[in-house]
Image (spheres, rainbow, N blue to C red):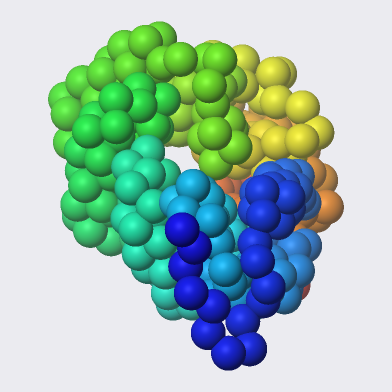
Amino acid sequence: MYRSRPAGAPARIGIADVQRVEQAARDLRALDYRFGGGSCHGTVLSKLPGARAMLGGTVPVRLTRRLDAAVADMHNVAGWTLFDNGDATPALHHFTAALDLATRSGDKAMIANIRYRMGRVHLHHNAAGRALAEFGRGRAAAMAANCMLAAAILSANQAWAYAKLGRAEEAIEALAVMRTEFDAADSDDVPSWAAFFTETDVVAMIGSVHTDLARFVDNRYARQAVPALEAAIGSYGDGMARSRAFCLISLAVDRLLLHDVDTAVDVGCEALRHSRAIKSVRLRDRLRPLENEARRWGGADELAEGIRTMLPAAS
């Protein structure tokens, strides 16, 4: 049995066609992690019409769900790269399209991942309550799929949202849940959209959550953030350059909160060096809290000025 082909739709779709879409999503996601969404969002958008056209082709029934999931993931990558490039509204449009296709495919684990990414848009734009709602929906989908890695990603981000809301006890509890779920995950069967969440990212999230607890609850949490962030920075390779830069920014904030100004300036300047090679509006947005904190310290003038001169180039 085949889906009927409407006029103008592509010819019969085979496994090789679906694999090409899957590989394109993997390749573009890798570019995003290393060079930022600004480096590849245009390429993603240029490939999407061809991928979507396949949905109207003649598709064997055994491939329909896999094709739906593959095109969903292309929308997922499009949404993430647009978000990283500072385009939140079209990003959410693509995440919605991804969610529709992932739902049609029955891929609950991918639904969880899309919900995570939608939540991250809200979290970045200071809507932690809306982010928590998306993370909760995503975690429910992950548990329904029995995908512990996806669940761990959602729990980690719930912890981060709680930290931004100043809810320390819930943040710490969510981190503990994340660790349990991550340890229970099947490391031999990891989809490309979840492969970023390694032990290094677990440690980075611990550092990020404690950084925001230090900012919004008590600066003593910075003492727990520092070793976690330093471990993550030492473990990230060039393929995760943006994540390493995020950690450097957070580490510089923590060092300032601990009154270690000289080290903060060194780390912050290193963050700026890494950031210049990455086309990410989101990365530059993350520099603003560091700039604000640096301006409070006379010995951090160099760092504050370096950030100030860099930010206009991102707008």
Q: Position of residue 287 (x, y in %)?
A: 59, 53
Left or right of residue 288, residue 37 in this image: right
Q: Residue at x 72, y 75 (%)?
A: 46
Q: Residue at x 37, y 44 (%)?
A: 107
* Of 102 and 203, the residue lying toward us: 102
Extreme-front residue of the structure: 1
Left or right of residue 119, residue 79 in this image: right
Q: Position of residue 73 (x, y in %)?
A: 54, 54
* Of 273 and 6, the residue lying toward us: 6
Q: Is residue 102 above or below residue 218?
A: below
Could you say which quadrant of the image residue 221 lies in? top left
* Of 52 and 116, the residue lying toward us: 52
Q: Where does the C terminus fall, quadrant-wise? A: bottom right
Q: Position of residue 166 (x, y in %)?
A: 21, 40
Number of disc labels: 0
Q: Is residue 138 visible?
A: yes
Q: Is residue 108 above or below residue 52?
A: above
Q: Residue at x 32, y 55 (%)?
A: 103
Q: Residue at x 41, y 16 (%)?
A: 185
Left or right of residue 144, residue 25 in this image: right
Q: Position of residue 146 (x, y in %)?
A: 29, 25
Q: Is residue 280 visible?
A: no
Could you say which quadrant of the image residue 299 lies in? top right
Extreme-bottom residue of the structure: 7
* Of 103 and 6, the residue lying toward us: 6
Left or right of residue 157, residue 286 in this image: right
